[in-house]
Amino acid sequence: MVNEEKIAEWIERFKEAREIRRKYANWEFIKSQPPRLRAALEYYIETGDYRTAAKMAGMAIDEFVDFAKDKANIPTVD
């Protein structure tokens, strides 16, 4: 059984990672993208789920991660 402290710790890490992605993302670039790609980038920022975001964007996972990192300045947070 997972204890409540461990769950709270994971929730806090998730929130911190989201804030880092939000802070460093190039929002001007993201807002200039076509709707489908913009939605995928915003989804990735909020969730950190690059697999689903890549599918939303119609891109391969590695292609999406490189695009998000190199073009949109969204950091990969572990």
Image: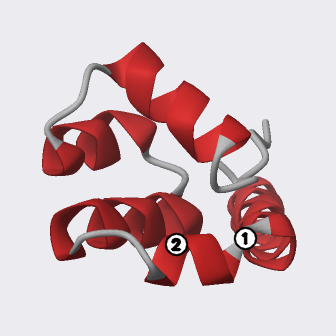
Q: Which residue is mark 1?
A: 26
Mark 1 → mark 2, Cα distance in angstroms: 6 Å
Relative placement, left or right, of 30 versus 28 is left
Q: Amino acid at mark 1?
A: Asn
Residue 39 lies in what quarter of the image? Answer: bottom left
Q: Element at badge 1? A: loop
| Label 2, residues with CA under 10 Å away: few <14, some 14-19, many ≥20 | many
Q: Considering the image in quadrants, where does the C terminus appear?
A: top right
Report whether residue 69 is seen. yes
Relative placement, left or right, of 41 versus 18 is left
- 62 vs 20: above or below: above
Colouring method of the image:
secondary structure
Q: Considering the image in quadrants, where does the N terminus appear?
A: top right
- 58 vs 29: above or below: above
Q: How many numbered discs, if any?
A: 2
Q: Amino acid at mark 2?
A: Ile
Report whether residue 1 is seen. no
Relative placement, left or right, of 14 versus 12 is left
Residue 19 position in % (x across, y down): 80, 76
Q: Which residue is mark 2?
A: 30
Residue 51 lies in what quarter of the image? Answer: top left
| Label 1, residues with CA under 10 Å away: few <14, some 14-19, many ≥20 | some
At x 74% / y 39%, what residue is drawn? 76
Looking at the image, do the residues carrying marks 1 and 2 touch, with CB atoms under 8 Å apart? yes
Residue 10 position in % (x across, y down): 73, 56
Residue 62 lies in what quarter of the image? Answer: top left
At x 75% / y 64%, what residue is drawn? 21
Relative placement, left or right, of 56 versus 39 is left
